[in-house]
Amino acid sequence: MTTATATLPNLTAGTWAIDTVHSTVGFSVRHLMVSKVRGTFNDFTGAITVAEDGTAAVTAEIQVASIDTKNTDRDAHIKSADFFDAEQYPTATFTSTAVRPKGDDYVVEGEFTLHGVTRPVELALEFNGVNPGMGNGPVAGFEATAVLNRKDFGITIDMPLEGGGAVVGDKITITLEIEAGLQA
């Protein structure tokens, strides 16, 4: 059951579909203990459903094989059984369970499934407002972040460095930049 306890101002009741052309699902992870690798998922869908009372619910699906780190060899390795095992677990999904205010912003609580493992996740959400759009109806903007531990989702590969540490960090920062349009 999806419930929400906060309303987002000026977000009209209905279904707001994520506009994938104007949205980004990105991430970063520590690499060699000293820098970060950044990437995106290029194939995703989602919607924000706003009830008549203003409460919101969010659903999203990501095709994990659409990962793009700007390095085809690395992308192939991440898609392999060492990491995502994209053949066996082709999608990652998110379903909200609550939206609550936090200062001027919000927290979206939900269930995130990756690599066949479902865990509770909290997204820090900034609501950027609503714009009348450019002739196709209103659009709303959101930015959200979360920090996940890949090992919590069964991605436990360890690639230790000779001098200590690891090639890939455990903490993954997820960054969502979302534009959604109200469906007619």
Image (cartoon, rainbow, N blue to C red):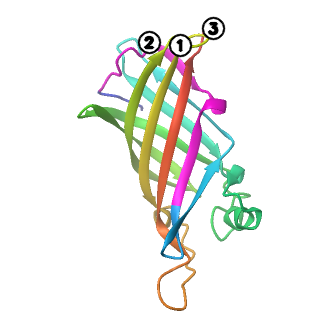
Q: Is residue 94 above or below residue 78?
A: above
Few, some or many residues within 10 Å of mark 2 (<14, 14–19, 20+): some
Query: How far, Cα to Cα, is label 3 from label 1?
Result: 8 Å
Numbered badge on residue 138: 1
Residue range highlighted in magenta: 6-28
The one nearer the camera, 167 or 77, is 167
Q: Which mark is residue 70?
A: none
Instruction: Measuring from the top left, give residue 142's x and y in whole percent.
Output: 46, 31
Q: Quadrant of the N terminus?
A: top left
Q: Going by the image, does 174 lie left or right of 42?
A: left
In the structure shown, which secondary structural element does the residue marked by tag 3 occupy? loop
Contact, mark 2 vs mark 1 (Cβ under 8 Å)? yes
Image point (56%, 48%), residue name: 26
From what the image shows, is residue 47 above or below residue 133? Answer: below
Crowding at label 1, few (<14), some or many (≥20) Cα neighbours within 10 Å? some
Task: Please check the rendered image and state whether residue 11 is part of the magenta-colored stretch, yes or no.
Answer: yes
Q: Position of residue 24 (x, y in %)?
A: 58, 40
Tally of numbered discs:
3
- Judging depth in this view, the residue of 54 and 164 nearest the camera is 164
Tell me: residue 36, above or below residue 14.
Answer: below
Q: Label 2, on which residue?
A: 12
